[in-house]
Structure formats: C-alpha cells, structure tokens
Image (cartoon, grey):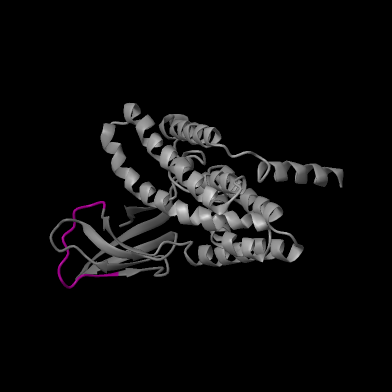
Amino acid sequence: MEHKNALRRFTDRLFGGINMSWPLVIILAVGTAALTTLFLVAPVFENTSFYRMGVFWDAWILFAVFIMSNCKKPLESAIKTFVFFLISQPLIYLFQVPFSSMGWSIFMYYKTWFIWTLLTFPAAFIGWYITKKNWLSLLILSPILLYLAYISLDCISFSFRHFPRMLFAGVFCLCQVLLYMYVFTSNIWQKLLGIIVPFAAAAIFLFATLNPSMHAELLLPDEVVFSKNAYAQSSDESVAVITSLPTDGSGIVEYDLHKYGTTDITIKDGNKEYVYTLKVYENDEGHTNTEVTRKK
C-alpha cells in the first residue's frame, strides 16, 4: 500500500502538480528538439526505437499530455501546447541542417509537422479535460490509446522477429497506456476498458495487415524472352502469384504478394520449362523484400 501511495503521489505531482510556466515550456521545447536531433543524426541510433522520436508521435504524445495536465485552464493548455510544438518541430530541422546532405532543403519535410502543429491547438484545448478523470477523460484519450496500443503491439511483434529491435518502443507505448489509465481514470471499469478495448482492436487490425498485400515487379536472375503463349504457375498461391511475364527480354515479371514465405514459380513456354524459387520476407527495417533464384 505504501508503494502505491508513493506512486500516486509521484504521478499526481508529474501530471498536475507542476507550474507549467512559459520558461518551462520553452526549455522543454528546445531540450526535446536537441535530444531528437541527436537521435536522428547520430549513426548509433539509426533504425532504433530512439530514432522514431524524430518520425512518429510516440514520445510527443507524452510531452503533450505532460503540458496539458499541468495547465490550469483549457485555453492555457491549447496555447502552451501549440507553442511547444511551434518551437520544437522547426528546431529539429534547423539543428539537422549542418549534419544533413540536404542542407536547408531538409525543411521540405516540416510541412506535415506544421499541419499537425496547427491541430495541436484544438486538440490540447479538448485534451485538457482528461484532468477531470472521468468517463469524458477516457473518451478523449481513446484515439491516443488506440494509436499507442497499435504501435506497442506492432513494435513488440517486430521485436520478436528481429530481436531486440523496436522492443523499447513497444514497451514505451505500452507503459504510456498503463500510465494514462492509472492517472486519468477514477475507477476499475474505466481502466479496464481503456486497456482492453484499444489493445483488442489494435490486435485485430494488426493481424489483418500482418502479411504483405501488394502488386509489384520482380527481376528474374537471367535474361529470358518468353512468347505470348507462356504462362506461370505458383506452387503456393497464398504466398505469391505471377500476373504478367516479360516478352521483351527485360526479365521483369509482375506479381501479387499475399504473405511471407517461399514458393516455386514454374514458367512453361512451349517445350521449355523454367523453375524459380521466390522468397518473400521482412528485412531488419520492417520492409518487404523478395529474392528469386533459378532452380532449373
């Protein structure tokens, strides 16, 4: 019980017991921008959970909630959250200029973040009401909880396939969900709904999109010219199906991917037969890759 009381005192202080002054907002904006830049430009952080801070919303949600919950009124929450993002986001690109081969052109990527920054004003105005710690709080938090639950499951499942990559990001998002339910809800039913429903919905969506579903092109490992009468057959059409064969010597076939795995592709052209093995897999960066080898 003492541990729980100590934790409650800490979270109440962190989310509601701090004077969110303008100097603190500015210091927080500059500090998070500098930290994010470090994660983006230092090679050691490339393709890690920390690199995500400069690309996705995972950590910025926590900063926004921290600012909102320590403001006294919804308008103050809206203004200070908006200014925080208005300072931090362009600074991230400004700090990267000396380290980027793009130079000042790197600001072309700021457009999307600027649009999101504009949206933080109304979002933070409404978001301030999570401090009421009731059913309205849960309703306001629900889109954030769903996003965090999806990222958590996605990163953790990715980590199982490419351990330990993205494990920290998955656990970090999971902890955010648990933290917000602990701090901003007042009874067990709110907490359970805020955890179970987002993770259940995220799991269903993640399972439905786990395997690739795409139409693309594949270069065969040899220069073969097929006639218009040639046709292809996949030994496992649940993995991939060839939809078009090259008749110009390019060696490029079109195919539909359905899931990760291996299948043999047999191409028959009159009396000639060509057999290739196609491997569809996810690389260490989470992208779908293919490899094809000639069998005979």
Write the residue at 49% across / 56% down: 123
Q: Indicate whether residue 224 is drawn in magenta.
A: yes
Q: Is residue 92 left or right of residue 18?
A: left
Q: Is residue 102 visible?
A: no
Q: Indicate whether residue 36 is drawn in magenta.
A: no
Judging depth in this view, the residue of 229 and 253 nearest the camera is: 253
Tell me where residue 252 appears, x and y as whole percent.
22, 58
Q: Residue furthest right?
A: 1
Magenta stretch?
221-232
Image quarter for residue 104? top left
Q: Compared with residue 189, is residue 54 higher up or lower down, i.e. above or below? A: above
| Quadrant (top left, top right, bottom left, bottom right) of the C terminus | bottom left
Tell me where residue 27 appears, x and y as whole percent.
52, 32
Q: Residue furthest left?
A: 248
Q: Is residue 86 left or right of residue 138?
A: left
Q: Is residue 158 left or right of residue 103?
A: right
Q: How many marks?
A: 0
* Chief SS of the magenta region: loop
Write the residue at 33% across / 54% down: 292
Judging depth in this view, the residue of 101 and 23 nearest the camera is: 23
Judging depth in this view, the residue of 92 and 168 nearest the camera is: 92
Tell me where residue 164 appears, x and y as whole percent.
57, 42
Q: Is residue 27 left or right of residue 112?
A: right
Write the residue at 18% across / 57% down: 224
Write the residue at 48% across / 61% down: 210
Q: Residue furthest top?
A: 98
Tell me where residue 131 appears, x and y as whole percent.
65, 54
Q: Residue furthest bottom?
A: 229
